[in-house]
Amino acid sequence: MHLITRWALVAAALAAILPLQVAAQQGAGKIMTLVVSFSEGGPTDFMARLLARPLERELGSQVIIDNRPGASGNIGTKQVIASKPDGLTLVHTTIAMQAINPLMYPNQGFNPARDLVSVGITGALPNVLVVHPSSGIKTIAELIAKGKQKNAQLNFATFGPGSSPHFFGVLFEKLTQVAAMPIAYKGSGDAANDMLAGRIDYMFDSMTSATANVNAEKLVALAITSPQRSALLPNVPTLKELGYDAADVNFWLMLQVPSKTPPEIVTALRQAVSKAVQDPEYKKNVAARGVENLYVPPDRLDTFVASETQKWRETAMSIGIKAE
């Protein structure tokens, strides 16, 4: 083997190893705080808790979860932006927080695209359009027909302004020309309880809670928002299948740190998160709860987040989502 080739191989190996060494040295013996800007028990929370273990192994530091719900994720996100940019405080958040919240809360005092930088995508989580069995509705066509009846006053539950159920609910209104009133709840648990009690006409529920309730025949699933059907609910068609191509937007989650975090720490965290999200146990556990694998390599992360943010923002603006 030529000497130049040997040195090239050594350089490539060092390039792969050094970021993880930086991460380990930077986090060793320290506590890393992973802020979840939503309530306990929801998708953003349980995914963060499942990811904490493989992250600890990669970084050599303890990872604790700190739930800071409120204002559709703005409270926890603002806390992370204001934290010391040392790579020890991260936020687990969503594409909706990144793209839609600035439209909903123009005076929040920060801009996620400017003030945060992504260090990894943790997975994609579809929403499922569900109705209560007592409604007698079994298809989207029947729901639309009900909504277009004279004096019909449908409503749908959301997890708060700007949340994925709110986004998909408004998108569904525009695509079907069915008027409905959004009912905002503080979190997924409260919304689900009213949905199960039959007090709400429909909801774009998270895949996690929807699957169990649909399989138990407590709710009826009409469609799913993912690009493909889910293995957990194989008989439920996608919105795209049903002719609603504009609804083909993927809802995904990510880890972010303050944008002032030193580049070498960002690089190290990206390498660590990249390995953590590919951990077999993590993938198995989140898949069992409806999370779809969405792996984006570190070198494509910035481009992916920027393009997806633009796509979500344009869709939100096209359907009239704005400050309330």
Image: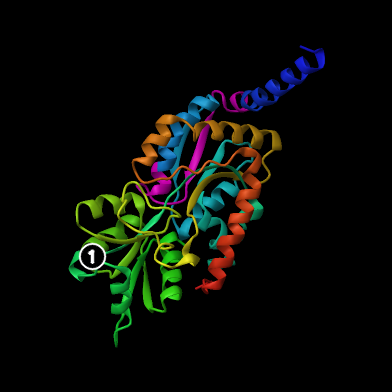
Residue 90 in which image quadrant = top right
Q: Position of residue 25 (x, y in %)?
A: 62, 23
Front-lying residue, 98 or 168 = 168
Front-lying residue, 70 or 306 = 306
At a point 33% along the width and 75% down the height, the residue shown is 144
At a point 42% along the width and 58% down the height, the residue shown is 225
Residue 9 in which image quadrant = top right
The color scheme shown is: rainbow
Indicate left or right for 218 with 230 as reference.
left
Front-lying residue, 16 or 106 = 16
Question: Which image quadrant: the N terminus?
Answer: top right
35 is within the stretch colored magenta: yes
Count of numbered circles on the image: 1
Query: Judging from the image, what secondary structure is the residue with disc 1 in?
Result: loop
Q: Position of residue 273 (x, y in %)?
A: 54, 35
Q: Which residue is mark 1?
A: 132
At a point 65% along the width and 47% down the height, the residue shown is 302
Residue 302 visible in the displayed image: yes
- Residue extending furthest bottom? 150
Residue 205 in which image quadrant = bottom left
Indicate left or right for 173 with 233 as reference.
right
The amino acid type found where label 1 is placed reads His
Q: Position of residue 228 (x, y in %)?
A: 42, 53
308 is higher (above) or lower (below) than 52:
below
Q: Position of residue 49 (x, y in %)?
A: 41, 38
89 is higher (above) or lower (below) than 227:
above
At a point 29% along the width and 88% down the height, the residue shown is 150
192 is within the stretch colored magenta: no
Residue 258 visible in the displayed image: no
Q: Few, some or many C-alpha atoms within 10 Å of disc 1 (few <14, some 14-19, many ≥20)?
A: many
Range of magenta residues: 23-46
Indicate left or right for 74 with 13 as reference.
left
